[in-house]
Amino acid sequence: MSSYPVSLCAVPVFGGMMIAVPAGLVASPLENGRHLGEADRSALVIGGTEKVRTGGAVVFCKVVAVAEAQVKRDGQVRAKGSPVHHATLGPLEEKAGPGAAGAIAGRAPLAARFVKGERERLLARAFMIRVIVLMTLMPDARPRDVIAALAGDLALVPWARPWRPASARAAGDWRSALGPVPLEELRDLVLGTAWREHQGKGCPGAVTIGTRRPLRAGAVDGTLLRMPDTPANRAFFGSVGTGDDSSPFPQARALPVTCCSCRALFAMPYGPAGTGKAASEQGLLDEAAERYPALLDPGWIWLMDRNYHGAPRIARMTRSSHVLIRLKSDIPLKRTSEILPDGSYRAELSGDGVTVKVRVIEYWVTVEGQEVPEMFCLVTDLMDWEDYPGPELAALYKRRWDGSETALREAKAPLRGAGPGTGPMLSSCSPALAAQEIAAWTAGTAMTRGVVLDAARAAVPAGKGRRAGLEVRPRDLSFTRALRAVLSAIRLGRDCYQAVTSEIAGYRNTVDRDRHRARKSKSPSHFPHASAKDTVTRIAPAIITMASTPA
C-alpha cells in the first residue's frame, strides 16, 4: 500500500517545481530495456507505471542533481548536501578532464587566516576553483552573480540546509585562501591537453607549408594586461612608459603561444611589464622554452614579429623546431649565396658571439588603392627552397595576424576594459591574486577554444556559399557565440556536450575576405579627430612581389 495520500494527484505542476523520484525506479522505455544514447531523443520513464501512451499527460522533469534524500517527519523530501558539491563548468569540464577540478581541489590547502574551519556549505575548494575561472569569462558580473550562475538550477533544489550565494567578501576570502597554485595547476593541465590533442588529431583546415615534410604553423607574440593601481601591483609588475613609472596602471607582460589554424592556446608565460619590450619578451620566450620544451617540435614552424630575439635564442629554437621571423631594417645580414630560383637567398645572422645560417625572403605587398612603402624581410632556418619556396613563406606569414592578434583580441574580449587605454583589465589588487586571475583566464580561454575545435570537427559543411561542401574550420565559428553558448549551458546545467557543440557550429564567421586597413588597429578608434582615411577598409587581394629575382 502506498504511504502517500491520494491528494497527490490534485497537486498543480508548474515551472520550477522539483519532483523527487527514487533513482531505482528510473527506467528506459526502449525495447529490450537497452540504454539510451545521445542519438536517442526519448525521455526516461518511471518503472512500475503503466505504459506512456499518445495523448496522455506527462510531466517532463529535468535532472538537476542526484543526491541522497532526507525525509522529514512531516513527509517533506529534501536533498542532503549543497550545490557546491554538484556544480560544474558544463562543457568546459570536458576539456579539463573528468574530475580534474575535484582532484586539484583535494590537493589544495587553505590558508587558515582567510577561511577558518572545515565546513564547506556555501563555498568549497572545487566550487571556488570553478567560480574563479567563470569570473574571468563574466567580468562584468558581481561575485554573487557568478556564484549564482555556476549553481544555476541547483539553487532550486530543496536542500536539507538552505543555500544562498556567498557574499563578495566570502568569495574574496576564499580566493585569498586558495592562492594561485590550484588555478596554475588547472591551467597547465588544460594547456597540456590542448597541445597533445593537436599533436594527435590536429585541427580542421590546418595551416601548413611544405609537401614532402609539411609543417604546422604557430604564432608567438606579446601583450600587456593592465591591473588595478595598488602599491603592491605597481611594485611587483611595474609599467611600460617613462622612467618615472608614471603610467596610469601597472601592467603584466604575457607571451601567448598559439596555433595559427584554430587559435588554440598552448602556453602563456607572463611577468612584470619591464622597461623594454624586447628584453621582457625575450625573457618570457626563454621561460616558455624551459617550461614547455615539447612546443619546440620539428613538425611546427613558429611565426614571430619584428621584436628581434637575438641570434643565440634563434639558434636554440632551431635546434629542434623551425622559425619564420620578420626582421627590423637595422638588423644586419651577411649574404652568403646568389639569389635562389624562388627569389630568396642564404645569409648569416650574427650576434653575441653566435652565427646562425638563415634563408632570407624579401618582398613587397601591394593592395589595390593602398600603398605599402615598406619591404618585408623574413628569415627562416628552412634552407630547402624547393619544398618551402619564398612566395609561399611570405603568404604564410600573414597567418601570424590570425594566430596572434585576432586570437588575442577574441581572448581579451571578455575582460573588462580591454580596449585601448580605458582602464584595468584585471580586478585583482595583489600580485598573488593577479597570478590566480591570469591562470584562470588562460584556462577558461583555452577550454573554450577546445570546445570550439570540437564543434568544428563535428560541424556539417555549408550547403551553399563560398565554403559549400568544405570542412568547417575553427576560425569559421564565432568565438563570442561559443562563449555565450558555454555560459548558457553552465547556467542551465546542460550536460549534453553534443548539444552545445551543435549550437556553436550553427554560427559561422565570414573569413578570408581580403580586407585591409592602412592603419593596423586592433581596436577601432572612437576619437573624433581620427581621420576616416586612416581606418578605411579596402576589399582587394594582396599581391606579393619578391624583391629579388635570380640572375
Image: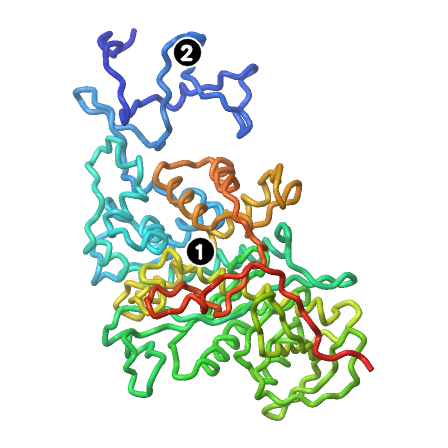
Q: Position of residue 418 (x, y in %)?
A: 36, 63
Is the image coloured rainbow, by chain, by secondary structure, or in one colour? rainbow
Residue at 69% across / 79% down in the picture? 360
Q: Position of residue 170 (x, y in %)?
A: 20, 54
Furthest residue toward left: 74
216 to the left or right of 437: right
Q: Which mark is residue 48?
A: 2
**Which image quadrant is residue 544 in?**
bottom right
229 to the left or right of 332: left
**Which image quadrant is residue 39 in?**
top right
Q: Secondary structure at mark 2?
A: loop
- In the image, what residue type sits under mark 1? Thr
- In the image, what residue type sits under mark 2? Gly
56 to the left or right of 477: left
**The N terminus lies in quadrant:** top left
**The C terminus lies in quadrant:** bottom right
Furthest residue toward right: 551
Q: Nearer the viewer, mark 2 or mark 1?
A: 1
124 and 457: which is toward the camera: 457
Residue at 40% across / 71% down in the picture? 224
Q: Position of residue 249 (x, y in %)?
A: 29, 73
Residue at 58% across / 69% down in the picture? 293
Q: Is residue 16 above or below residue 246?
A: above
Q: Position of residue 449 (x, y in %)?
A: 49, 52
The number of discs equals 2
Q: Which mark is residue 445?
A: 1
Decide: few, some or many residues near mark 2? Use Cα within 10 Å; few <14, some 14-19, many ≥20.
few
265 and 479: which is toward the camera: 479
Q: Find the distance from the CA under tag 2 to the CA under tag 1.
A: 47 Å
Q: Mark 2 vs mark 1: which is more N-terminal?
A: 2
Q: Is residue 3 above or below residue 183?
A: above
310 to the left or right of 164: right
